[in-house]
């Protein structure tokens, strides 16, 4: 019989028997997941599919027909001996040779003999023997004549194994078969069956985690099919591959100017750069450095293309030149669209272009949930731009030449970012320059090398021969020096000078609300700026009752608080559970390990905050994460309320968004006045909105003349300061504040009771 060996490397499973240093077979349990496990199982599944057995779930017990056929062929005799079992195997499984039959007979005998020693009677042993024989015939017959060969058959079992199944697999292991046992729920159930851990080894690798929720044999099968279909997309592989950034010194422009012949000697690679430089190292010399870079590239006769603050969108003529149809799946789309890539001067470069195009599109498909129409539009943009620039970049190209593409300014949209990624996979140095660090770039890539400098400069055009650099640069520096003098540590601030803020709730007396309400943030107590982060003091209060029971004066005091930056809510609830919200079904996908997946949120088809300033979008998502982490809302991470929090915050109405967009962290902040004169309770969604807007920087006051506990229901913590100001009054009708005259209390009464004109 074959002995089980301890696995030293996952690839040992795929060695032929005569290539294994210690011989033997492998029987491993896999209870955890990482990328190495995934790739191993994809390969092992294919091997088991071709020369092995894949078991998805339990082995079914022999049915009545199976048993009847067994008795018809083999009879009902049973003796616990190797010779009896061997004779039965010869009749029952005739394709096995003598060597294989002997191994199986001895393994079966050992298993049954151990059961006898454990106290099992002859009837149980006979039933077990017949069960094993039926399983060998109906489940494993296809590999019985392969057992113990140089190419050992493979068995892949998925799920929680039973005692008899484990004994069966142990028989096959001793007979010359490799086995992998996939256990998604851990090892505890198995250890109850194999207390001495004598049948198999537990695979332990660094960084193993729990299996993903959707992982399993069905996933492996689908992934293999997907990879096969993907490989068909590429066709013939190019002879060269990119070696991006691995060779660079990190000196920026100097790396770009390094001749191709000095970058590396391996003829399998072309050596290119993919680099983004944010800010400027020296604003006095920066324009001269750019000019020198441009002139040296031009003098080297390298292919060259330039985009300045955006790549012009494809023209109608360029789009019409791309052959395309309507598609129902992404593979067909990529297969047909990639046929538009034609570069007659070089078949190798054409292969590289096709591979780069498919690579970046497949990555984008995985990272976004874009519709196929949107994906098609992106792909068409890439193909149009490739056609537009390929003549400039690759005219008379031959290995190991490297062209240069300079993008001045950050990528403005996803299509431009994808095009930069695609160029980085071609024989092109891609250099993205963002001299003004306030400019944003949508590009994110694993193979991108970045340099960051604290200083910054406004550069509208790449300097060329006819550029008058000195005049503009001198004026710019003079303006910036004056700017620094005026707005740093002086108490004066530029519009939207700061992009990050944290909010603190002020504890105050009721009379202070009216004083603080219209005051700019910078004049409030506890305002501060630390490391470019603004501390924003805000009001978050509930006002219960009516002062002195005087209703007209009560409405006048509220009217005085209504400004152009104030949202007034009259009556609860403001947001109802049944209101349409396109994020309810998607909210669970936006959270992983309690962390918001910002890119997934921004890429969602219903994400409506893209028109806001980039820094304000980040502010919103940061405060949403803070709300999730704070346990302010009752039920978060207990009953799914975290998903309601996400969907509610991502579905705020346009009035609120406009208030957020205008918010300057050092000036007057937006306001929310919520008036509730009835017994109605704030909805969970109302509470989420209020808690979120408090974190964003809103002043919020709830006016509750009844004094009812209608505000606090969904708040886990006591975060609202309550002011008891007077008599509780019920069933008040909220007036039209446009008609409330703050200078005439008599007219207010007339408005309420509809007296007079």
Image (cartoon, helix red, strand yellow):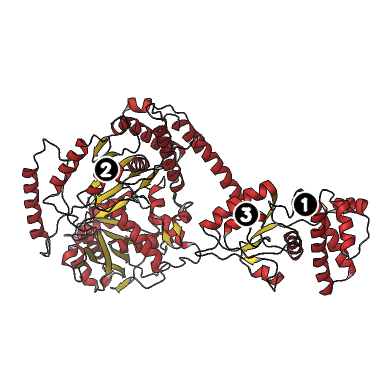
Q: Which residue is mark 2?
A: 259
Residue that appears at 38% across and 68% down: 630
On screen, residue 700 versus residue 576, left or right, reads left
Where is residue 479 shown, x and y percent of the image? Answer: 8, 51
Question: How far is mark 2 from mark 3, CA to CA?
Answer: 44 Å
**Which type of secondary structure does the marked residue at label 3 adopt?**
loop
User: How packed is label 3: few (under 14 Cα within 10 Å), some, or many (20 or more)?
Assistant: few
Residue that appears at 80% across and 66% down: 111
**Which type of secondary structure does the marked residue at label 1 adopt?**
helix
Question: How far is mark 1 from mark 2, CA to CA?
Answer: 62 Å
The answer to which quarter of the image holds residue 645 is bottom left
Q: Is residue 749 above or below residue 525?
A: above
Q: Is residue 329 above or below residue 710?
A: above
User: How packed is label 1: few (under 14 Cα within 10 Å), some, or many (20 or more)?
Assistant: many
Residue that appears at 66% across and 55% down: 18
Where is residue 589 shown, x and y percent of the image? Answer: 47, 54
Mark 3 or mark 1: name the one nearer the start of the chain.
3
Which numbered marker is on residue 495? none
Which numbered marker is on residue 144? 1
The answer to which quarter of the image holds residue 304 is top left
Disc 1 or disc 2, which is closer to the eye?
2
Question: How far is mark 3 from mark 1, CA to CA?
Answer: 20 Å
Badge 1 vs badge 2, beta-carbon distance below 8 Å: no
Disc 3 or disc 1, which is closer to the eye?
3
Where is residue 599 shown, x and y percent of the image? Answer: 39, 52
Q: Is residue 583 above or below residue 236?
A: below
Mark 2 or mark 3: name the one nearer the start of the chain.
3
Q: Is residue 653 above or below residue 173?
A: above
User: How packed is label 2: few (under 14 Cα within 10 Å), some, or many (20 or more)?
Assistant: some
**Which type of secondary structure does the marked residue at label 2 adopt?**
loop
Q: Which residue is mark 3?
A: 15
């Amino acid at each position: 019989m074959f002995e089980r060996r301890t696995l030293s490397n996952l690839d040992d499973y795929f060695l032929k028997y005569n290539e294994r240093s210690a011989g033997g077979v492998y029987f491993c349990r896999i209870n955890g997941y990482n990328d190495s496990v995934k790739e191993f199982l994809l390969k092992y599944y294919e091997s088991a599919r071709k020369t092995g057995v894949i078991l998805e779930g339990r082995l079914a017990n022999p049915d009545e027909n199976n048993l009847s056929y067994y008795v018809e062929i083999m009879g009902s005799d049973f003796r616990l001996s190797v010779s009896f079992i061997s004779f039965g195997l010869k009749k029952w499984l005739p394709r096995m040779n003598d060597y294989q039959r002997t191994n199986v007979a001895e393994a079966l005998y050992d298993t049954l003999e151990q059961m006898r020693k454990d106290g099992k009677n002859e009837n149980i042993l006979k039933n077990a023997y017949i069960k094993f024989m039926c399983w060998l015939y109906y489940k494993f017959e296809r590999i019985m004549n392969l057992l113990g060969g140089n190419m050992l058959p493979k068995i892949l079992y998925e799920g929680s194994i039973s005692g008899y199944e484990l004994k069966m697999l142990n028989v096959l292991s001793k007979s010359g078969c490799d086995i992998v046992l996939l256990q998604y729920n851990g090892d505890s159930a198995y250890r109850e069956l194999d207390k001495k851990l004598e049948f198999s080894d537990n695979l332990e690798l660094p960084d193993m985690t729990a299996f993903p929720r959707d992982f399993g044999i069905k996933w492996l099968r689908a992934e293999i099919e997907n990879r096969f279909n993907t490989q068909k997309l590429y066709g013939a592989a190019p002879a060269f591959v990119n070696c991006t950034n691995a060779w660079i010194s990190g000196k920026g422009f100097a790396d770009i100017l390094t001749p191709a012949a000095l970058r590396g000697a391996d003829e399998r690679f072309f050596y290119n750069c993919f680099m983004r430089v944010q800010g400027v190292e020296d604003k006095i010399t920066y324009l001269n450095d750019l000019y020198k870079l441009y002139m040296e590239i031009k003098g080297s006769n390298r292919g060259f293309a330039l985009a300045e603050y955006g790549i012009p969108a494809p023209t109608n003529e360029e789009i019409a030149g791309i052959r395309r149809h309507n598609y129902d799946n992404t593979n067909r789309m990529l297969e047909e669209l990639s046929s538009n890539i034609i570069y007659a001067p070089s078949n190798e470069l054409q292969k590289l272009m096709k591979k780069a195009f498919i690579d970046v599109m497949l990555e984008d498909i995985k990272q976004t949930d874009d519709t196929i129409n949107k994906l098609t539009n992106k792909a068409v943009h890439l193909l149009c731009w490739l056609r537009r620039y390929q003549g400039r970049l690759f005219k008379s190209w031959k290995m190991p030449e490297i062209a240069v593409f300079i993008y001045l300014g950050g990528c403005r949209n996803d299509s431009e970012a994808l095009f930069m990624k695609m160029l980085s996979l071609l024989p092109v140095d891609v250099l993205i320059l963002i001299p003004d660090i306030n400019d944003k770039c949508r590009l994110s890539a694993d193979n991108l090398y970045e340099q960051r400098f604290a200083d910054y400069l406004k550069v509208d055009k790449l300097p060329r021969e006819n550029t008058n650099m000195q005049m503009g640069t001198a004026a710019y520096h003079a303006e910036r020096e004056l700017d620094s003098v005026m707005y740093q540590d002086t108490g004066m601030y530029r519009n939207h000078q700061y992009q990050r803020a944290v909010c603190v709730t002020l504890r105050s007396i009721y009379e202070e609300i009216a004083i603080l309400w219209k005051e700019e943030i910078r004049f409030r107590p506890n305002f501060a700026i630390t490391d470019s982060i603004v501390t924003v003091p805000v009001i978050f209060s509930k006002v219960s009752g009516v002062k002195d029971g005087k209703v007209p004066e009560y409405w006048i005091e509220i009217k005085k608080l209504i400004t152009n930056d104030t949202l007034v809510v009259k009556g609860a609830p403001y947001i109802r559970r049944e209101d349409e919200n396109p994020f309810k079904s998607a909210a669970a996908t936006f959270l992983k390990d309690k962390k918001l997946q910002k890119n997934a949120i921004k890429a969602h088809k219903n994400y409506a905050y893209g028109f806001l300033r980039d820094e304000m979008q980040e502010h919103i998502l940061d405060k949403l994460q803070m709300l999730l982490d704070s346990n302010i809302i009752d039920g978060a991470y207990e009953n799914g309320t975290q998903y309601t929090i996400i969907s509610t915050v991502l579905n705020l109405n346009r009035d609120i968004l406009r208030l957020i967009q205008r918010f300057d962290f050092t000036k007057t902040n937006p306001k929310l006045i919520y008036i509730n004169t009835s017994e109605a309770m704030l909805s969970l969604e109302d509470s989420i909105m209020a808690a979120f807007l408090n974190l964003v920087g809103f002043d919020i006051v709830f006016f509750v003349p009844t004094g009812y506990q209608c505000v606090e229901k969904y708040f886990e913590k006591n975060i609202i300061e309550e002011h008891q100001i007077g008599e509780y009054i019920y069933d008040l009708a909220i007036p039209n504040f446009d008609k409330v005259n703050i200078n005439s209390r008599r007219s207010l009464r007339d408005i309420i009771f509809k007296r007079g004109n």
